[in-house]
Image (cartoon, helix red, strand yellow):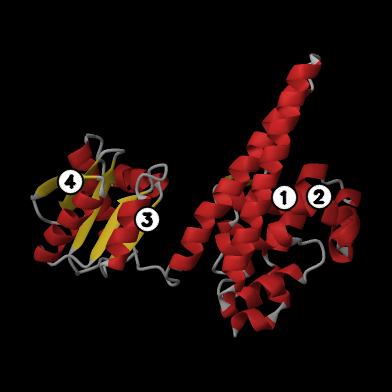
Amino acid sequence: MTQISIATAGIDTAKDKLDIAIHGDAARWQVENSVRGFKRLTTLLTKAGVERVGIEATGGYERRAVKHLRAAGFTVLVLQPIQVKAYGRVHLRRAKNDALDAALVAACTAAIDRPRIEPDARLQDLADHLTFVEQIEEDIARLKTRLEHIDDPRLRRLVMADIARLKARRGAEMLRIVAVLRSHTDLARRFELVQSVPGIGERTALALVIRMPELGRVTREEAAALAGLAPFDHDSGKYKGQRHIAGGRGRLRRSLYAAALPASFRWNKALVDLYGRLTARGKAHNAALIACARALSTCHEAYPAFRK
């Protein structure tokens, strides 16, 4: 991490309000988490000469503010809570309230390098729509589980009608996402490239293109870490602990894992061979599948066209 000299602000997000602090300045502000509040926030930051803003991810309540600030020309870094918490521990900051949290976010943002790859607003909007599709799929799974415990014919018909309605909505939303994606030449090309990998269907290709815009611009190790599929060491002294995956983009990881299961048994010969080698060496079923999912997350390695 390197110290940034430009004026940096930090924002602590709540459902109804935003607390703002500027790194190295005692000033503290609070605005509504609404369009009216965003306009006032933009004015305050501009007057203070702020160019760089850090905001902690807070269950989606930060999204509208991030979108507004980026449209206004600010460099916005969305920090994960673990980053801010770790920075606070390093600097022995234990006191906590909204204003102090904003100052901590500002200090953490000032110490972090600007990301190499800038976010793509087109993909951020599509990610929200893809999340909606995934939530519909979760609702369908819950209803199917409920159906297993219902014997009354009338209630079964009601639940089955709900499942059919959700499936139709899911199909319509998928068609809409694909149409929007294909309306952009560069995204359509990436989508086709990903789909050409054996074992990756439309649903997984959407997850990869939308949730991992870094494809083709990061190493395979970085791609695996972004997807939460990189095995991390857990060793200390003479102790050799078991490797575990952790962190990363949870929804992307679940999509890749779901695709790896059929691909490693039938659709992708390279993954079938990989799964066979790993299990023959004594690897557990889940560990072998995670390795196959990791291979799918680095599919861009086989396609130099991704880098063009």
Give me the disc on residue 73. Answer: none
For label 1, the crowd category at 10 Å Cα-Cα, with few meaning under 14, some 14 to 19 and many 20 or more, is many
User: Quadrant where the N terminus lies?
Assistant: bottom left
Residue at image mark 3: 78
Provide the secondary structure element on which disc 1 rests. Answer: helix
Upstream in sequence: badge 1 or badge 3: 3
Distance from disc 1 to disc 2, alpha carbons, whole Å, reads 7 Å
Q: Say above or below: 249 vs 117.
A: above
Q: Nearer the viewer, residue 273 or 305?
A: 305
Give me the disc on residue 31. Answer: 4
- Camera-side mark, 4 or 2: 4
Q: Amino acid at mark 2?
A: Leu
Upstream in sequence: badge 4 or badge 2: 4
Residue at image mark 1: 257
Residue 93 spot, x, y in % from top left: 24, 40
Distance from disc 4 to disc 3, alpha carbons, whole Å, reads 19 Å
Q: Say above or below: 118 vs 80.
A: below
Residue 42 spot, x, y in % from top left: 18, 60
Upstream in sequence: badge 4 or badge 1: 4
Q: Are marks 1 and 2 in contact (CB under 8 Å)?
A: yes
Q: Is residue 85 left or right of residue 224?
A: left
Q: Is residue 230 visible?
A: no
Q: Is residue 200 visible?
A: yes
Residue 17 spot, x, y in % from top left: 23, 41
Distance from disc 2 to disc 3, alpha carbons, whole Å, reads 33 Å
Q: Say above or below: 50 vs 147.
A: below
Upstream in sequence: badge 4 or badge 3: 4
For label 2, the crowd category at 10 Å Cα-Cα, with few meaning under 14, some 14 to 19 and many 20 or more, is many
Q: Are marks 2 and 3 in contact (CB under 8 Å)?
A: no
Upstream in sequence: badge 2 or badge 3: 3
For label 4, the crowd category at 10 Å Cα-Cα, with few meaning under 14, some 14 to 19 and many 20 or more, is some
Give me the disc on residue 261. Answer: 2
